[in-house]
Image (tube, rainbow, N blue to C red):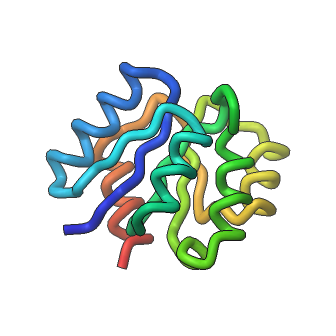
Amino acid sequence: MHSILAVDDSVSMRQMVSFTLKNAGYDVVEAVDGEDAFDKARSRTFDLVLTDQNMPRLDGIGLTKRLREHPGFKNTPILILTTESSDQMKQAGRAAGATGWMVKPFDPVKLIEVIKKVVR
């Protein structure tokens, strides 16, 4: 079973994402912000990181940069799921090492399709 680290400071969004992923057969670990996610990522590996952008303490792009510096996450797919849709933000995400960018509100079917494409 593939494991996914789902990061969002919104409890309701984390629950929706987690519910969608678990129903699709994924093992999900939730994190409340980028710092929490990075702590969890240091103690185990994940097949994918799905993170929000706008969060306290450490945002999605900051988390992506830190994960890419960690040897265990150099090749792990990182998707940013956010309300941000500007080309400038997407470019910053790519520059940080994000694999993809999806805009909220998300379509559960599309989310699972994208995850299946990037998780090997």
**Quadrant of the image occupied by residue 68:** bottom right
Q: How many marks?
A: 0
Find residue 45 and report its horizontal and vertical position in percent: 41, 68
**Residue found at the very far right of the displayed protein:** 88
Find residue 116 and report its horizontal and vertical position in percent: 33, 67
- Quarter of the image for the C terminus: give it: bottom left
**Quadrant of the image occupied by residue 73:** bottom right
Task: Residue at 44% x, 71% y: name it.
Answer: 118
Side of 1 relative to 37 (left or right) = left
Q: Depth check: give the residue in front, 86 or 49.
A: 49
Query: Would you place residue 46 above or below residue 86 in this image?
Result: below
Find residue 4 and report its horizontal and vertical position in percent: 36, 56
- Quarter of the image for the N terminus: give it: bottom left
Find residue 40 and report its horizontal and vertical position in percent: 46, 52
Q: Depth check: give the residue in front, 26 or 34.
A: 34
Task: Residue at 41% x, 60% y: name it.
Answer: 114
Query: Would you place residue 72 above or below residue 67 in this image?
Result: below
Side of 106 relative to 72 (left or right) = left
Task: Residue at 22% x, 57% y: name it.
Answer: 26
Task: Residue at 73% x, 48% y: name it.
Answer: 62
Q: Depth check: give the residue in front, 42 or 5.
A: 42
Query: Would you place residue 10 above or below residue 67 in this image?
Result: above
